[in-house]
Amino acid sequence: MQKRRWIAALALLASLSLVAVACGDDKEGDSGTGDETTTTAADSGGGEGGGTLSGMKGTAPLVDLGDEFKNRLKSIDSSLSDYTYAAESYDAAIVVSLAVAEAETDGIGYAEKINGITRGGEKCTDFKACSDLIADGKDVDYDGASGPLEFSGNGEPTKASYGIMQFGTSGCDKVTTKSGTALKECIDDDKTEFVTADAPKSADVPQVPVEGDRKGDGVLKMGTLLPKTGSLAFLGPPEFAGVQLAIKEINDAGGVLGKPVEYVEGDSGDTDNKVAPTTVATLLGQNVDVIIGAASSAVSLSVVDSIITAGVVMFSPANTSKKLSTYADKGLYFRNAPSDILQGQVLADQIIADGNSNVYILAMNDDYGTGLAEDLKAGLDGGGATVLGTKVYDPKAADYSAEVQAAKDADPDAIALIGFDESSKILAKAAEQGLDLSIFYGVDGNMGNALAENFETGK
């Protein structure tokens, strides 16, 4: 999602309604989530533009990064204040490098080693220690900055850490600022709790065979497909910093295959500006061996075929869409952000733990929104709660009065809102209609900036 106090604050705020990592679709991400972050206001007031944040709780894919790792990231980018998906991006580069070292090639064959790097061998937690073990002929189990990983055969984690966070009182009394900067101080770190979520046993599938015969040239070259522009551009700095830090530390330790790792930076944009296909073509033209990205699941789905057809590995630090779990990827797509399957269950558990038994779901109309709504409903049903109804809405609608009224008429204990930037409009409309914002829960840490900027006026 870590983390990541700054995005946590924004995402949580955003997730009033909300929010990995990435990133389900253009949310992501996260960690998501999808893509993702989920939150609820514990003491919200009515009235457009208002809403008390003190006591608000939220959940997000989250690992306690610690100051040491954050300081290393700041050595790459001293302006960082948000660490969302930095650890996942860092680990993506480390895992790929270790797989290349074990396979002794930067050609397509190293993809067969990626899942095994994360499980079943001798534990190690940094590139040098792991690469030394590989040089000694030993199998390694890399546990990274983003958590235990433990990849399934389809190249995604079966374990993930989530943080249960709470807003304090300082600077968080009202959502009345158009700048989210002050909100980063609102999270009471002393009250943050971390839990580990496990994917269902059925998610731990056999190894997906690698198809293709692309040869390597003996030099590992990494490309990035991460957001510099578009709705997720605020996620770019920590993700780029994570990859660059990993490459620096790998090269300081002697590189891979006896040579320094090379790096080519690229912009993913989002599904609106559609820069990803051009970036992918440029990266493939420069003979990269892996493309780290995208942050958005929707962006990844728009270019994954081009990448895997070229025999190149795609490794996302933020995608959370379930569609990617079973995608026909020739064994070349990987991600270390948790699937929405885990996020739906964590959100359901939190809603039920807070004493809610009747829940209404508002979900944006795309693969991410409807898919996560299904997982959330399954978790709520399994936990004994009743889903009073699910309203799927157009994320580009001009007005959400009808959607908010439908949720209000259902008279729920809690409203789960699964959306992106438009969630700010929905929250503003909810406050206008007199709904207590404390009953909202959400997912998507990627709408934090938009909510901080737009909630006051409901733009």
Image (cartoon, grey):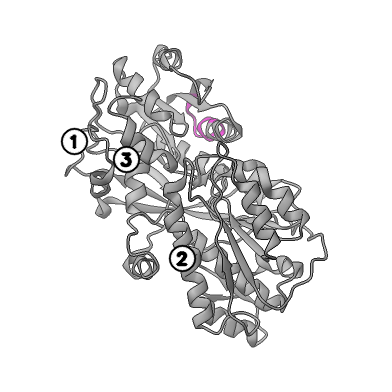
Segment colored magenta: 377-386
Placement of the C terminus among the 4 image quadrants: top left
Q: Position of residue 107 (x, y in %)?
A: 74, 70
Give me the residue at 50% from left, 59% from top.
88
Q: Position of residue 14 (x, y in %)?
A: 37, 37
**Helix, strand or loop status at disc 2:** loop
Tag 3: amino acid? Lys
Number of callouts in the render? 3
Q: Earlier in the sequence, mark 2 or mark 1?
A: 2
* In the rendered image, the vertical position of residue 21 relative to residue 99, given as above or below: above
Q: CA distance from mark 3 to mark 2?
A: 24 Å
The numbered mark at residue 145 is 2
The numbered mark at residue 173 is 1
Which quadrant would residue 222 be assigned to in this image?
bottom right
Tag 1: amino acid? Asp
Q: Position of residue 326 (x, y in %)?
A: 71, 46
Q: Which residue is mark 3?
A: 57
Work out whether residue 61 or residue 413 is closer to the camera in this orientation and state it: 61
Give me the residue at 23% from left, 26% from top.
50
Magenta residues: mostly which secondary structure?
helix
Res. 40 in view: no
The nearer-to-camera label among 3 and 2 is: 2
